[in-house]
Image (tube, grey):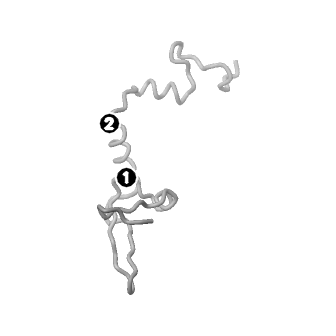
Amino acid sequence: MKITSKGQVTIPKAMRENFGLLPGTEVEFVSGDDDELRVRKAKTGRRRGEEFVEHLHRAGKDFTMSTEEIMKLTRGEDWGTGHLEEGDGNPC
């Protein structure tokens, strides 16, 4: 990978997922031996779960579905009737 003219690099998706580097995660650079440079999560005192919740809050700011609509989707209910749709595991 190359450094952009703004000094940016892209962290590969597999690495971001493996190390839990979500958008907004703070990182720090640490110099190692000779010409080695390491990037690691900054020790902010927050846990990964807190970072994830914060990420969801930022990502969902334009989310317009109500809690009831979300629950219907997760239950497989038909929005109009409130009943389970055919083939959703309803024994009736």
Indicate the position of residue 39 as horizontal and vertical percent values.
38, 70
Which residue corresponds to the image point at 32% horizontal and 36% vertical from the top-left? 61
Indicate the position of residue 42 as horizontal and vertical percent values.
33, 66
Q: Residue reaching furthest front?
A: 5
Indicate the position of residue 33 as horizontal and vertical percent values.
39, 86
Report how far apart the C-alphas of labels 1 and 2 lie in the structure: 15 Å
Which residue corresponds to the image point at 34% horizontal and 75% vertical from the top-left? 30
Q: Quadrant of residue 60?
A: top left
Q: Secondary structure at mark 1?
A: loop
Q: Quadrant of residue 62?
A: top left
Which residue corresponds to the image point at 32% horizontal and 68% vertical from the top-left? 28
Number of marks drawn: 2
10 or 3: nearer the eye? 3
Which badge, 1 or 2, comes first in the chain's sequence?
Answer: 1
Q: Residue reaching furthest bottom?
A: 34
Indicate the position of residue 46 as horizontal and vertical percent values.
33, 59
Left or right relative to 56: residue 88? right
Specify the amino acid type for callout 2: Lys
Q: Quadrant of the N terminus?
A: bottom left
Identify the residue under disc 2: 61
Q: Secondary structure at mark 2?
A: loop
Name the mark on residue 23.
1
Q: Quadrant of residue 92?
A: top right
Specify the amino acid type for callout 1: Pro
Left or right relative to 80: residue 2? left
Q: Residue reaching furthest top?
A: 81
Which residue corresponds to the image point at 38% horizontal and 86% vertical from the top-left? 34
Q: Is residue 84 above or below residue 13?
A: above
Q: Is residue 21 above or below residue 53?
A: below
Instruction: Please tell me how crowded label 2 is: few (under 14), some (14-19), or many (20+) other residues with Cα within 10 Å.
Output: few
